[in-house]
Amino acid sequence: MFKQHTEQTRLLPRIWRFINIQILLPMLLVTVAPVANAIPVAISWDAPTAPGTVYRLEVTSDPGFANILVTQDVTGQSYAWDAPAEGVYHWRIGRSGDHTSGGVEQSSFASGSFIVLDHSAPRARPVKLSWQGAAVVAQYKLYVTGSSGISMTMVTSIPSIVFSEVRDSSSIVVAPFRGTGPERALQMDPSLTLDSGNPAPPLNPVALPPPPPASVVVEESTPTPPAPDVPSAKRAYDLYIGVDSGREDMTLNKLETGLSTNAPFSGGSIGLKINPQGGFAVRSHLSYHDLKSAESSLTEAKEESQSVHFARYAADIAVAYNFLEPFTLPAHSLLLGAAGSAIQLPFLSDDPFEAKLVSRLPVKQKQISAMGGYLGYSFQGRNVGFNIEGAYLWEESSDAVIFTERLILDYLISDRYIIGLLASYRREDAKFCSDDPALCLSHGKSATSTSVSEIGLLFGIGQF
């Protein structure tokens, strides 16, 4: 009996050594071994959390959370994790302990999806990210974070994006971008897919019998037409400023006395186009010029002349509808609507002439507001566009008739900045009465006729 007890005593250390070497040691090595090519990822959530409360975070590569990669109790609003490989991952967070008997979360108050890219992975084609678009979302914002910690954002109007080159291992989050409210409204997206561009495994070569000889038929290939030069998204507004120069031909008459001049001027302009490619659109333009003429002929005294120097402005606004909106013509707009203008016009007043060697006619200015119709056509390509518009306006009290024609050529030098050229022509005819009704009856009205031609250089921004 003593001998049997001694053999059992010697057998126990051998069994314990076998368990340590054959079972526990491999498990320990698997647990602490680092993941090859691990990609650091920072998972964060903006959901409100109670201080000191423990939450359960789960990360998986399966939208149904059947194969959970990480189960971690957290107390903050972020978690650093090393993704084992390139791919699409999903996460959710809820209160720790809210589990069924199977260990699956009953509810989660925050969830999300992200894509991990490995810059060292071999690729035979560009990487493509795609997801299911939403009808109420016009744009999507991508949050890209590199392994070096550098972050950047990108905006796209279609539910996919292609990366021609992956220079740094990165994590990418896609969120709807509505322009108002929280931009990064995180929610798990099962439709998020990744085409990593990895080459397909080579097929085993199979020896095939040589094909029978056949006659070679050469077919002419039809060239593929180039893609139309249309913008990928519609603009929300265009805002531009410009410097202008031109020439004004002006004739002022009252009774048998008149003043005529043709002189250059310089000035500036500001323009705004709201929804330029949409249904209802708004056009506005403000111009200001300074005219100075050293020699202006007097109608009554051909040998006499006087200098003329004044500055005036013209402000136009139009509200119109694009009648091409129902058709599939995103680059073209045909606008018809109403227009208004506030403008300063010069005229000869009834003030007495100054007693000088050269008679000087008193020139004053009066502001009028006119209403009328508007017609415009515009084309907006991917980078180049033009807009031609005209308005016919009138004002009854001064018998004013105003005709405006304007052409704008613009070039989109980046996603936002615009340069362009402006050419415009304005014809103005009006009759003004003196402030004194008696003088108006005796002297009559002062007739004004001007024509303004100008050209300018524009600088502006465009928002999609």
Image (cartoon, rainbow, N blue to C red):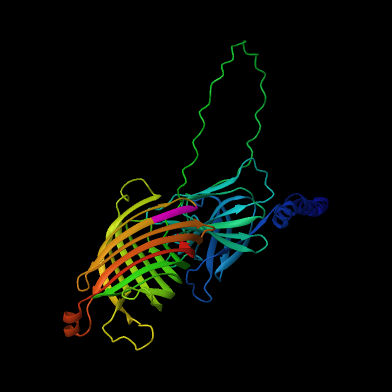
Residue 177 x/y as whole percent: 45, 61
- The answer to whether residue 231 is left or right of residue 337 is right
For residue 25, above or below residue 268: above
Residue 122: image x %, image y %?
68, 44
Q: Position of residue 36 (x, y in %)?
A: 71, 52
Q: Nearer the viewer, residue 79 or 422?
A: 422
> Magenta part mainly helix, strand or loop?
strand
Q: Is residue 1 above or below residue 444?
A: above
Q: Residue at x 72, y 56 (%)?
A: 34
Of 65 and 288, nearer the camera is 288
Residue 177 appears in the rendering: no
Residue found at x 44% / y 49%:
132
Look at the picture and state if 277 lies above or below 252.
above
Location of residue 315 by image quarter: bottom left
Q: Which residues are magenta?
A: 383-387
Where is residue 328, by image quadrant? Answer: top left
Indicate the position of residue 15 as horizontal and vertical percent values.
77, 51
